[in-house]
Image: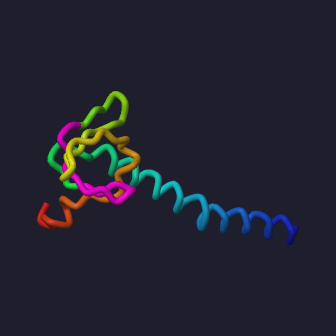
Amino acid sequence: MDSSVFLILMIGIMVVFLILPQTLRSRKEKKFKNNLKKGDLIITKGGIHGKIIEVNNTNDTCVIETMAGKVKIERTSISYDMTLARNPKK
């Protein structure tokens, strides 16, 4: 009886500390990617700063304008939205 209670307790702790945070992080990232829109100032995971000028929902890409020109990137490569950092009232 004691070992089964201990096993259930361990599984519960694993769910709370390992699975739930990952699920919440995944939902937050998905919401972030879906809320990207034309005009947002972003930073890619590679460190490129730019402004979104086109969003393509069919293949999850977007075109950003940088100082060097226009670049087509995957939405998953966007790591930070600077629009909210510059305009915190939104």
Q: Would residue 62 appear left or right of 45 to someone viewing this image?
A: left
* Residue range (magenta): 42-54
Q: Main secondary structure of the magenta part?
A: strand
Total labels: the figure holds 0
Q: Is residue 58 above or below residue 28?
A: above
Q: Residue extending furthest front? A: 68
Residue at x 20% of width, y 45% of height: 69
- The location of residue 60, given as percent across then percent down, is 36, 35
Residue at (79% x, 65% y) in the render: 7
* Residue 43, magenta (yes or no): yes
Say which quadrant the N terminus sits in.
bottom right
The image quadrant that residue 2 belongs to is bottom right
**Does residue 76 lie above or below 3 as drawn?**
above
Q: Quadrant of residue 9?
A: bottom right
Percent position (x, y) of residue 19? Answer: 59, 58
**Quadrant of the rendering where the C terminus is positioned:** bottom left
Image coordinates of residue 28 in percent, x first then y, are 39, 55
With 44 as the anchor, is 11 left or right in this view? right
Q: How is the image coloured?
A: rainbow
Is residue 87 found inside the magenta-colored segment of the image? Answer: no
Q: Residue at x 20, y 66 (%)?
A: 85
Q: Is residue 27 left or right of residue 11?
A: left
Tell me where residue 17 sits by quadrant. bottom right
Foreground of the two, 60 or 1:
60
